Amino acid sequence: METIADIEWILACYADDVPANGGACVKHGNEQIAVYNFTRRGEWYATQNLCPHKQQMVLSRGMIGSEGNSCEPKVACPFHKKTFSLLSGECLSGDEFQIKTYPVRVEDGKVYIGILD
Amino acid sequence: MVGYKFCEKLVSRSNQFNIIVFGEEPRIAYDRVHLSEYFNGKSADDLSLSSASWYADNGISLHLDDPIQEINRTDKTVHSLKGATIKYDYLVLATGSSAFVPNIEGIEKNGVFVYRTIEDLDLIRDYAVNARIGAVMGGGLLGLEAAKALIDLGIKETHVIEFAPRLMPRQIDSAGSAMLQSKLKQFGLSIHLNKSTSEITGGEKIEALKFNDDTLLPVDMLVISAGIRPRDELAKLAGLQTSSRGGIVVNEKMQTSDEYIFAIGECALYNSMIYGLVAPGYEMADIVVTHLTGGDKSFFGYDMSTKLKLIGVDVASFGDAFITEPDCRTIVFEDTHKGIYKRINISNDGKYLLGGILVGEAEAYNILLQTVNNKIVLPPNPEDLILGSRGGEAAEGAGVMSLPDDALICSCEAVSKLAICSAVNDGASGIDDIKKCTKAGTGCGGCVPLVKDLITGTMKANGQYVKNIICEHFDYSRQELFDMVKINKLKNYDLVLDHFGKGDGCEVCKPVVASILSSLWNDVIVKQHTIQDSNDRYLANIQKGGTYSVVPRIPGGEITPDKLIVIGQVAKKYGLYTKITGGQRIDMFGAHVNDLPAIWEELINAGFESGHAYGKSLRTVKSCVGSTWCRYGLHDSVSFAIEIEERYKGVRSPHKLKGGVSGCVRECAEAQAKDFGIIATEKGWNLYVCGNGGSKPQHAQLLATDIDSATCIKYLDRFLMFYIKTADPLTRTATWLNKMDGGIAYLKNVIINNSLDINEQLEEEMQELVNTYHCEWKEVVENDELRKRFVHFINAPEEKDPAIKFEPMREQIKAKW
């Protein structure tokens, strides 16, 4: 179990900046983080921006959606449509890829991303 | 490969074991079955079966480049080359085999290679640069693979030398070999049968092969592929029982003469036989894993049936391929025109299939193999099995469903028919689902067509109506959804999803609905940018590395010198790579997403418009120079091409659309390879439709002859709108026509004879799209809110993606990644 104390919350952007039902890329030091505004579900997600399949910095430009009866939220890489769970980071297209996910908090129109120290 | 499979199976079934892997090669296990693809651009990484982190993640300690030197069976320890001493409870030998190198005089000369490891391939590749004539010793499966590799490496003249009187002596008979030989000749291979090499002549390096019949073949290099020898030297040293002809003797549990030591794969000798294929090796791995985890499973030999593609020729052999009369009856089909040979051996009572050989066409392999293995009673006309049913009732796919439940469908992963059908009954609905939950089709991939038939067959058997639904969120075909969206006048994705869909949508239905909305209402697509494919979202084509390319419209390929200068200036200013496209326009590559609005602002100010190269919409109408300049030209093809491109530009469709106009029958615009093609005649134009370049080229078909320009446009309006309204997503016009009941005759009847009484409507709908045309880039450039979206970092809009790097190439740039 991770404890809250380990997480540093960084101010990523304003909620208005991220398009409805879409993503945007946030710069955090040398890291690129994709943040998704899942307006349809009233949820926010964040993952690494790098698609592990062909090493492209593009996940924030991918389409989001859901899969299966459990409505697993997912993002599809715009390059070759590999899809990843926004909850677990697991690749849903049958490949052995895993992407990093981050917790997201939205307060007063500001989007915070939780970084594990 | 077999060693890796053992690890994979063991960690998936137990965490009780501490696994330590020693390997002689410097790299992790890789796919030797597809080794020759290394020469077609696959890298060593692509061939890897896993990653170094996979071993670490599963707690396996990996010692590469460090072969075991000695086994101490009393202490149960192993000693490695680098000096590690490890104690074991169980030891699994998966040492594989090495290439057999015959003892011929001169074999040590430079330019003589074996074909076994990636290192061998590297050596061959380096040497091939300076070689013109190459030879392969051995006309078996691996030898022909090696010959293919030499051709791929650009060797001008490639010879195959086989000792036996036929090629692939273990798999096919003389007639099949003759057919294969004539096919291979077409690919530039010279084949020498019945040849025994007595000497390799030359100085330091190989210069020629000398044969027993005293003939001489000058060569620059030689690849030896004359069979394999099991790597049993370590076992021999440890006093384990080995065979004098090579191989570590094992029992049906894969145990060697020491019960704590197992041998699997090509080093193991079971029942006096080495199993040199990957599938039995995987089965052996499974048996050892089952044994170690407390189960009980035995090896009883293995079906050595095989199907492969050799230099573009399908070759398969299954069951008892060589049994002959009077022990059986054979049915042979031979077509020297197409290069097809098929032979099946059936039991004397005509009831059962015993085996057979297929050369040149092996589509029936899977079902034939299943028929042998499951002892399925043959139909009254067994020749149908290789000739196809000729008349009478043809039950397509029924053959698959009649297999028994325990029929082995995927031999690499040992998946039965029952497992696949159960997965479908549990909700798996596509090949990807099946791969995920059963692993079927993830090995050599040969069973994939069979698995697909099983999926469709099972779904049909369950009474599930198999229809072309868009995705899990919409239970409708594109055509149905198109009509429903139209009748209900829905104008955005969320409304469509709320009305007719479920869930939250996905990357399949979003662009389909986006295309439908655009074809119906022609609104500015970037207003709903997050339902667009990336290219439509950023109005540019995403390229390797994450940059975009920019293509302004150049109708009919006609451009003024001033506009050419502007393109040059813009490309220079933003550091873009420029290339002429196949559609007679200019593509500028390497643009940062941040620069796109500024680039387009400059282009638009110079009079350019979006070229829609990013969209599923009209790309270009290619033209020849036509009657204005060409002495053969009948009509002004350029003017007509421009008129047509201007008319349909920006119209969104199920897939991209390309057109062409040629000024005479010489067809310089290649109009018959386009979705619509127009060719000048003495009396007017001939209109062709539904052609296609791409991976499956198809000529366009003649829709109307000798029509005037106005009629041509009228027919095009109807044709394009009919396509837009009825085609499945991402279906080009050629495929759309191929699937259409009645084909071109039906289409003619609709477009020319108005058989559906919809032509007036089609024309109105197209005119509406033409009237509402807008340049999407102009909308963005003039709108600050839209411009703001073209950034990489939302919290640092000025900064470009630092991951993007370029390197120089021929005085321009290319993406580095």
Image (cartoon, rainbow, N blue to C red):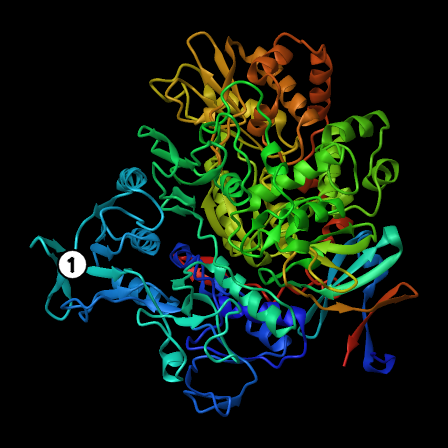
Residue B176 appears in which quarter of the rendering? Answer: top left
- Whether residue B571 sits left or right of residue B630 in the image: it is right
Q: Position of residue A29 (x, y in %)?
A: 70, 75
Identify which residue, B376 or A3, lies in the foreground. Answer: B376
Q: Residue at x 55, y 38 (%)?
A: B376
| Residue B609 seen anywhere in this rendered image of the structure | no
Identify which residue, B376 or B515, lies in the foreground. Answer: B376
Q: Position of residue A1 (x, y in %)?
A: 83, 78
Say which element carries label 1: strand
Residue B90 appears in which quarter of the rendering? Answer: bottom right
For the C terminus of chain A, give its image quadrant. bottom right
Residue where numbered disc 1 is placed: B197
Q: Residue at x 42, y 71 (%)?
A: B249
Q: Residue at x 15, y 58 (%)?
A: B197
Q: Residue at x 82, y 82 (%)?
A: A6
- Whether residue B25 sits left or right of residue A3 in the image: it is left
| Vertical arrangement, residue B559 with respect to residue B209, above or below | above
Chain of the residue under the numbered disc 1 shown in the image: B
Q: Position of residue A102 (x, y in %)?
A: 78, 69
Q: Amino acid at mark 1?
A: Thr
Q: Position of residue B755 (x, y in %)?
A: 67, 9
Identify which residue, B51 or B299, lies in the foreground. Answer: B299
